[in-house]
Amino acid sequence: MKVGIVGLGLIGGSLGMDLRACGHEVWGYSQRASTVGKAIVKGAVDVACPNWADLAPAEVIFLCTPIGLLVPTAQQLIPHLNAGTVLTDVGSVKASIVETLEPLWPNFVGGHPMAGTAKSGIEAAFMGLFKGNPYVLTPSDRTPPSALAQVETLVTELGADLFHCAPADHDRAVAWISHLPVMTSASLIAACLGEADPQVRALAQRLASSGFRDTSRVGGGNPELGVMMAQFNRSALLSALQAYRGVLDGVIDHVEQGDWAGLESLLRQTQQARSDYLREPPV
Amino acid sequence: MKVGIVGLGLIGGSLGMDLRACGHEVWGYSQRASTVGKAIVKGAVDVACPNWADLAPAEVIFLCTPIGLLVPTAQQLIPHLNAGTVLTDVGSVKASIVETLEPLWPNFVGGHPMAGTAKSGIEAAFMGLFKGNPYVLTPSDRTPPSALAQVETLVTELGADLFHCAPADHDRAVAWISHLPVMTSASLIAACLGEADPQVRALAQRLASSGFRDTSRVGGGNPELGVMMAQFNRSALLSALQAYRGVLDGVIDHVEQGDWAGLESLLRQTQQARSDYLREPPV
């Protein structure tokens, strides 16, 4: 199959490497010519496409730009496509993207590969990034079954764990397990910076160990990405934040009132529940 | 030197192994005779002490029981000690312990080795647990310099990174980097359990990956330990929780009002600040 990839970073580049290994012909587009060159050297792209029109022969095109560029990119690309071309994206939020792109291009299938590393860019791309990781597709009532089937076939070939759900359900789920953790973790770091005594702050910095390192990791990540999550998944994130605030208020109440039985019951519940959220064995 | 260890779990057992390797004679006491037997087999103890009085020859005694048992244990032990014996503890909260034990035994030095693993018990003890990790001593104005010097010598021999601070400063520092993270992390898990739609909850469980695993780790830990932190470090933890709630409210405001510049500024600050809290390179 001729597969187009627009945006050749970690996700787009890794997708190209895997799809080529499966025998597909990969047509690659990037805003920067040098990135396409690197992608060809790396074995992620067969055919460099300097212009949107060059992607016309592709049967399925993956939009792999940062989430804020998905819609403007699609708007530039669409005038050059044949009616039969299937468009899919890899954005980490789905409802707003699907609502905007579906009317513009009926042969559209929303998608989200749940895979990544701390690194980004074509240099970080590697074969097997998607293997064993969830890949969510969010078809709507209007998605043509043939378009869905074509994307499903490619995702299955990547060795990914295929899920289907409604765009809004996807966004609520990732608000809980991906976007809320970024905000609670960043709030932890910011709260520590509020310590007024410089000696105590310095001591805290020196004494922090693996517990703090793990709890603060996603809150110390890419700020632009955190803002994108909040912008594109605002209402689901807000619901999650408000629920979280309610739980936190309960914890503060337990500590304030010395209700140790109440606190222990909560901590027992979270200890038991955590394993349900770990695909891999607890660490 | 003759060193006594009361409580032969992960910390007490590892301490015994290291101190014996430094040439000291380790006198061990545990509530369970079988634990002392295991400690001897493991090379953590030279002399088994079935009774408190048997510890009398020890020059320095480490109290290594769970934090809730430190004071009652010291009260039982003290009547059997010689006036010159130095007593030190390894409790993870210091102000309340130091305030209670110092009047009972003037030759007391509060201590907290910041080392541990997910495992506990004598079976988990190993040589080198303290090497390169912080070991905080919290002497007061009343601590005899000779007692402090003896404990310092032993801690230095362990290869630990020695810190001194006031008990209250220690408690505020660990509230930020150890006790607050447990509460924010547990609140994250508990908030996710509040998702009313079982399909979305199940989807969140299946899609959760390394970000959620790290952020939820300490909130899924030992409930008794979490309660102990809150009980013994209540006022410092409450201050930290309240500061954290203030920051969280700010995040909620940014998202509610679409103040993306404000959110980005916060996330940029936390990204930069996090490295100050990591003794090891960022992961």
Image (spheres, coloured by chain):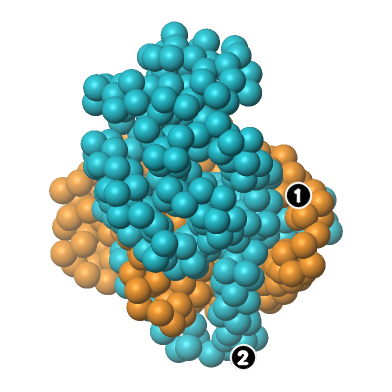
Chain colours: A orange, B cyan
In the picture of the structure, the residue carrying the numbered disc 2 is B257
Q: Which quadrant of the view contains residue A63?
A: bottom left
Q: Is residue A234 above or below residue B150?
A: below
A137 or A171, which lies in front? A171
Q: Is residue B252 above or below residue B49?
A: below
Label 2: element kind: loop
Can the viewer see residue B119 in this picture? no
A241 or A81, which lies in front? A241
Mark seen at residue A264: 1
Quadrant placement of the N terminus of chain B: top left
A161 or B34, which lies in front? B34
Q: Is residue B16 above or below residue A104?
A: above
| Image x and y of residue A74, in percent | 46, 72
| Image x and y of residue B232, in percent | 63, 57
Can the viewer see residue B156 in this picture? yes
The chain letter for the residue carrying disc 2 is B
1 and 2 marks in contact (CB < 8 Å): no
Look at 46% across and 35% down and name the residue there.
B82
